[in-house]
Image (spheres, grey):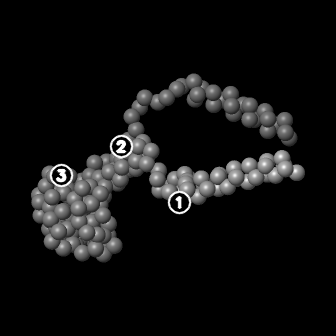
Amino acid sequence: MRTLILALSILAIIDSAHFAAAGLSDTPRETAAPADTASTTSEATQQTEQQIGLTKAKRRNVQRRLTTLGFETKANGTFDEPTRAAISRWQEENGYPSTGFLNAGQHKAMTDAAKQAAKADRKDRRRAGNRTRYSRGGGGPIGVIGGAVRGVGGAVRGVGSAVGGIFR
């Protein structure tokens, strides 16, 4: 039985060797379909925004995404005047009619852009070596001082035992 399994394994390896010899594929992969231009270019109104069905939590997420993209607004879940102004500035910067309201296409475009910006920000922080949040260092000034005191205490004990050994 073991011999049969071994023989089948060897045959499978030999048969699949031509895949390894073929190398990397040069055929392009399918990319994501572009967003529907009709829904992204049409003017957004209060009605189109209501069709998205934004709950208070989703409105907070929109506000956070605006902030991630550089359009500072308070994430309170209410599309108040400062939020409408931030949406208008985002629309203007991205070539949409500046209405202060979102439609489904604009909402998706904003979500995708914010995800890409957050991803790029994480990569930049990693490249910069900014790992203070997860640092395993001395634990701040107190930890460093505590470590130094422990080191000195150990040295003093070592000297005491060496001196004690001399006078015995």
Tell me which residue sits at (18%, 73%) in the image.
80
Q: Is residue 52 visible?
A: no
Left or right relative to 42: residue 33: right
The correct choice, above or below, for 87 with respect to 4 in the image is below
Tell me which residue sits at (74%, 49%) in the image.
159
Left or right relative to 101: residue 168: right
Label 3 sits on a secondary structure element that is loop
- Which residue appears farthest toward the top when viewing the image? 21
Q: Amino acid at mark 1?
A: Ile
- Whether pointer 1 and pointer 3 mark residues with C-beta atoms closer than 8 Å, the reply is no
| Cα distance between the residues tagged 1 and 3 | 49 Å
The correct choice, above or below, for 78 with respect to 116 in the image is below
Task: Please state, as top left, top right, bottom left or bottom right, where the N terminus lies in the image.
Answer: top right
| Cα distance between the residues tagged 1 and 2 | 52 Å
Residue indicated by mark 3:
94
Q: Residues within 10 Å of mark 1 (few under 14, many from 20)?
A: few
Tell me which residue sits at (11%, 60%) in the image.
98
Tell me which residue sits at (22%, 59%) in the image.
71
Residue indicated by mark 2:
31
Residue 149 location (% of width, % of height): 61, 56
The correct choice, above or below, for 4 with respect to 26 in the image is below
Q: Is residue 45 visible?
A: yes
Give the number of the mark in front: 1 or 3.
1
Q: Residues within 10 Å of mark 2 (few under 14, many from 20)?
A: few
Residue indicated by mark 1:
142
Residue nearest the viewer, comparing 162 with 87: 162
Q: Amino acid at mark 3?
A: Asn
Residue nearest the viewer, comparing 46 with 78: 78
Residue 120 location (% of width, % of height): 36, 47
Residue nearest the viewer, comparing 47 with 102: 102
Q: Amino acid at mark 2?
A: Thr
